[in-house]
Image: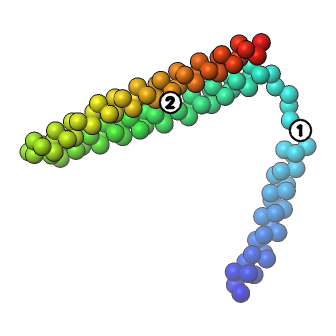
Amino acid sequence: MRKFLDYLVWFPAWLFAWLLAAAPAAAQGIAAREAQEVSDKLVEVLNGIIQPLGALVIFAAIAYTAFKMVATANKPQERAEALSAIPYILGGGIALGAVMLLAGFVVNLMQKAGQ
């Protein structure tokens, strides 16, 4: 019963706050944009997400491999297994760079085709 009463109290307050915040956004409408502006913004946003995320993943993989190498310093077999992960990390970084390069190429090609 307590949860139901909390719901009855908080739902109208939440709804009022949401409607108060959404009203100005709905009143402004949608601005017209050129295709060039949209594609530039898309490339900028994607690069802003992919580059730091890719750098973080590569850093974490290298840090994990380094930790594993230090932790298995006296065990040659396990240390060799840790070292064998480095080419895969390098390959992943190259693949990420290739995907970003290809995405930029495709977006620029579509920009030129739309002109």
The N terminus: image quadrant = bottom right
Question: Where does label 2 land, which residue?
Answer: 51
Q: Residues within 10 Å of mark 1 (few under 14, many from 20)?
A: few
Q: Is residue 73 above or below residue 6?
A: above
Horizontally, is 1 left or right of 58 in the view?
right
Per the rendering, the mark at residue 110 is none
Toward the bottom, the furthest residue is 1
Residue at figure coordinates x 80%, y 67% from the top left: 13
Instruction: Give residue 35's position: percent from left, percent from top.
Output: 77, 22
The outermost residue toward the right is 27
Q: Amino acid at mark 2?
A: Gln
Q: Quadrant of residue 47?
A: top right
From the top left corner, tell me how far across and down residue 114 is, in percent: 76, 16
Callout 1: helix, strand or loop?
A: loop
Percent from the top left, x then y, of residue 82?
A: 22, 40
Residue drawn 46% across and 29% down? 96
Left/right of residue 16 with respect to residue 90 in the rendered view: right
Instruction: Name the residue tied to disc 1.
Output: 29
